[in-house]
Image (cartoon, grey):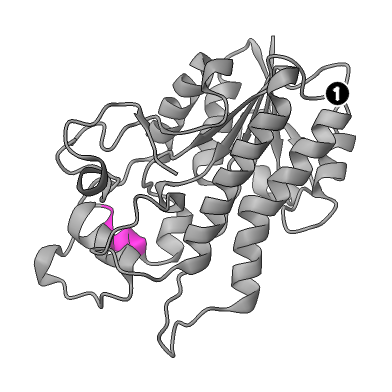
Amino acid sequence: MAIILIVGATRGLGASITKQYAAKSANTVYGTTRSPEETKDFPTEVRWLPGIDLTHSNVGERLASLLDPSHPVDTMIITAGYFATEDLTADKGPNWEQELRMYTTSSIAPVFIVHHLVHKGLLREGSKVVLVSSESGSIALRHPKEGGGNYAHHASKAALNMVGRLLSLDLKDQGVIVSIVHPGFMRTDMTKGVGFDKFWDEGGGESARIPPIDGAMWLLTNVCDGLAVAPDEAATSLIQWTDKLDINKTGEYWAPRGPGEFVPEMGDIGTAEAVLGKDLATPLKLPW
């Protein structure tokens, strides 16, 4: 029996991962939620851990207190996130509270979660920690054709990548595996909430004159036409990746679906070929 813990289990990718793991009777699946109202329409087999908010300083301590150390976690996937767009214009300039929330959720809370679970004996030899990041956290993949903007989104993911790398160094001797992954550009409430749903099925191409300062929108308009993947598909790829993880890949940064699993010449990592060249592999190891 495998014990699975999904942090951020009620929406988007997290919800799909939770449901797919729960569909296998051999798994015991725990999912975190901020409130019980978020747990409707899930299999009854999911064991909910309420009151887990990644913006709260006690998140790691509270999560560890709800789990039994006599049953350590085999796989923990941290997929909770928050995304707000920003640029240097007067209308959409950086917002202090939104930036704090992005950094805290993406790259601060995971440190405290892992710390408390390790010290309570919930992460042991063979345990897997999967940090859901994004290709947007790769400094090397940023390219002039994107422009700038969305500072905290990119930087918080870059910080998460560093967190994952450092945690892997601290935990390798204990046999705990840490993987940092880009799951793909997805059709979720998060991308819809920032207006990116307009790029799920069609893009504006070169005729869409998006201001260069909004680099993420330019990239999605010109490169990711119709390539948004459903959370269920991304979850399947991520679970397959996680099942095959071993200590040899700990601390590495990967795109399990590659630069574009179904349309390689387009890809969902718009700068991949410009930075890394053609004929890229799937899965794709990403540069920091």
Q: Residue 266 appears at what percent x and percent y?
A: 17, 44
Q: Residue 164 appears at what percent x and percent y?
A: 61, 39
The part of the chain drawn in magenta is 196-200
Residue located at (77% from left, 24% from top): 123
Q: Residue 140 appears at what percent x and percent y?
A: 37, 50
Residue located at (25% from left, 41% from top): 276
Q: Where is the N terminus found, in terms of image quarters?
A: top right
Pointer 1: what residue? 121
Q: Does the magenta stretch include residue 199?
A: yes
Residue located at (64% from left, 51% from top): 107
Instruction: Specify whether 257 is left or right of 35.
Output: left
- Where is 73 relative to 287, above or below? above
- Where is 92 relative to 120, above or below? below
Residue located at (87% from left, 24% from top): 68
Please tell me which residue lies in front, 129 or 77.
129
The secondary structure making up most of the magenta span is helix
- Where is 55 relative to 119, above or below? below
